[in-house]
Amino acid sequence: MLAKSMRVAAAAAACATIATAAYAATHNGQGNGRTTAQSAASRPRAEAAPRLAQPQRVPQHGLVKGMRLPVEDYMLSNADTAQIEDARAAVESACMQQHGFTFNPPSARDTIPVGFDEANMERRYGLADDAVARTHGYQLPDATDPSQEQAESDAEEKAENRTDAWDKTLDEVCIPEANKKIGIINPTDPAGELSAQSFEATKTQAPVTKALAAWSSCMNRAGHSLRSPLDAPAAFPPAAAAGHTVSKPSQAEVQTATVDVTCKKSSRLVAVWYKAEVAYQTKQIAAHKEQLQAQKARNTKLVDNARAVLATSGNQ
């Protein structure tokens, strides 16, 4: 079923450590109007995880503290996205009830993904926070085990007595109703596309390649043969633990992650790459101003529509 397959994909994506271009891609192409985060937020309300703290619009810790890319001015924050998804869920749930079905996803604010928005500054250049490295290694704090997500998805499907008719009603009647009342997040996403383009383009610029080489040399001296910080997490994939979260990182993972951040400090990789992207995006924005302004206006309308629906439903 469509809803189930989207949740499974979302659960796998939630355990990715680095989410730059990949993170942007999960927010695109949602033709039926359901975003990845909304699809992941499908556990019964009674089993919902504790609400996560809403992230600030600018990172407050680590090497990316205070950094905000120009293109982020045209993106929805995670808090805005959660509000829109909650409003869409309210419309969809009411619609399903009118047709004799049950659909009760928890608040999207309980499933905020890592990062502050689609640019994912928190880990855009890899792990960049000493405290996180020492505690979690490369793992995401509060990351959910994909197998547990699958189990919860199966339990929800059974509890809501989902059938082909259930899916058909959600996909063909209730989601279109939410599309009409709220709108669709990023039917086109020039900001996300420019964000991914600037990341790829700047990583081959001389200052960035020099900083990457310095980071790699630093890691090699510590016994870690890595060419890019984006390769590091692959050596330590999350392992499932009993319960709802991934297992505690190994001592080797913590040691590698800590050295990683230390080498980013000495090479100034984060500062150099960020500076390159700011310059690159400034030119991008000038060349795509009309598209970006249209996206910003659409985002504002989405948030306004969501607030109006949530005020009516009493779910603000």
Image: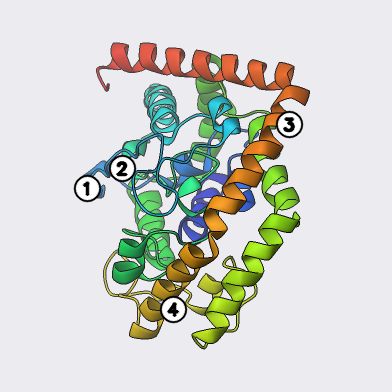
- Distance of label 1 from label 3 (alpha carbons): 39 Å
Give the residue type at disc 1: Pro
Q: Which mark is residue 256?
A: 4
Q: Which residue is mark 1?
A: 50
Kindly identify the amino acid type of the residue bearing the numbered disc 4. Thr
3D distance between C-alphas at marks 4 and 2: 30 Å
**Residue at the location (58% across, 40% down)?**
27
Q: Are marks 1 and 4 in contact (CB under 8 Å)?
A: no
Q: Tell me the tag on residue 110.
A: 2
Give residue 284's mark.
Answer: 3
Q: In the picture shown, does residue 223 fall above or below 113?
A: below
Quarter of the figure with residue 45? top left
Residue 96 % position (x, y): 42, 28
Q: Earlier in the sequence, mark 1 or mark 2?
A: 1
> Dot 4, crowdedness within 10 Å: few (<14), some or many (≥20)?
many
36 and 118: which is toward the camera = 118
Q: In the rendered structure, which disc, 1 or 3, sits on the residue that comes first in sequence?
A: 1
Q: Choose mark 1 or mark 4, whichever is in front.
A: 4
Q: Earlier in the sequence, mark 3 or mark 2?
A: 2
Q: Quadrant of the C terminus?
A: top left
Q: Of the residues under marks 4 and 2, which one precedes in the sequence?
A: 2
Give the mark nearer the N terminus: 1 vs 4.
1
Which numbered disc, 4 or 3, marks the residue that appears first in the sequence?
A: 4
Looking at the image, the residue that sits furthest to the bottom is 223
